[in-house]
Amino acid sequence: MERPRMIRPGIFSIDAATDRLRGVFDAHNEALIAHQVPVDAVFFGDSITEMWALDVFFQGINGGLVNRGIGGDRTVFARRRFEADVLQLHPRLAVINIGVNNTWDLDLSWDPSQRREPEEIEDEIVDDLAAMVRRAREHGMAVALCSILPTDVPFKGTTAARNALILRANPRLQALAAEHGAVYVDYHARLVADDGQTLRAGLADDGLHPHVQGYQIMAAILLETLREAGLEAIARRG
């Protein structure tokens, strides 16, 4: 077997979280391409995607599901690895969920000079996701653009500002999806508390990463949304 020509983004060499799995993903991508394995959906994002046990929550699903989530990843780096981890695998569907890690720049109490304004962070998230959605649509694949989840991180004094940013960003993501013929998956509406901003109690141990009950809700929302949109890239057997 000849080795296929591969897209390899390399490492970013600035202590970027996305570098952690670069070698693993390159090896797995090469195997998929060399063996011409059909990919029905790539789940692309940060730790919320990486920690999602797709083989458990989507048992009985037709087709191949690939997880390309990296804990700590931000949209600026995700945008740069999108061609390698999504486009070259030619999935029928890209499920994109990323953006919350950009908002840690609201904190940075140890170096206030690096702190950024909410508007700048929000624009960065939307601009980077717009570029990814456009590229996916240009390659003829369906896109499920997911809302950023609400948070309730008790040791972060900026939770209110973070959730307010997320509330502003999500409608822009919904409009972005509509503009490019993508599907908007609204996890936020079903995971938020009665205040309309904070992550509902009992869905995450740390106020950020869903546990089994949170992921169960997310899986149901995703399948329901795709079914309503007539997308069969992920479908239950039988």
Image: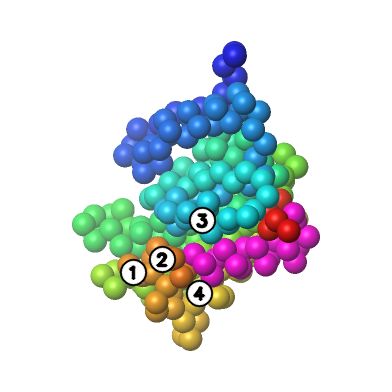
Residue 37, image x, y percentages: 64, 33
Q: Closer to the N terminus: mark 3 or mark 4?
A: 3
Amino acid on which disc 4 is placed: Leu
Do the CB atoms of the residues marked 2 and 3 lie less than 8 Å apart? Answer: no
Lateral position of residue 109 relative to residue 226, left or right: left
Q: Closer to the N terminus: mark 2 or mark 3?
A: 3
| Gap in angstroms between the C-alphas marked 2 and 3 | 13 Å
Which residue is identified by label 1? 205
| Gap in angstroms between the C-alphas marked 1 and 4 | 14 Å
Amino acid on which disc 3 is placed: Val
Q: How many marks?
A: 4
| Gap in angstroms between the C-alphas marked 2 and 4 | 12 Å
Amino acid on which disc 2 is placed: His
Which residue is identified by label 2? 211
Q: Nearer the viewer, mark 2 or mark 3?
A: 3
Which range is magenta? 215-232
| Gap in angstroms between the C-alphas marked 3 and 4 | 20 Å
Question: In terms of secondary structure, where does tag 2 sit?
Answer: loop
Q: Closer to the N terminus: mark 2 or mark 4?
A: 4
Q: Closer to the N terminus: mark 3 or mark 1?
A: 3
Which residue is identified by label 4? 191
Amino acid on which disc 1 is placed: Asp
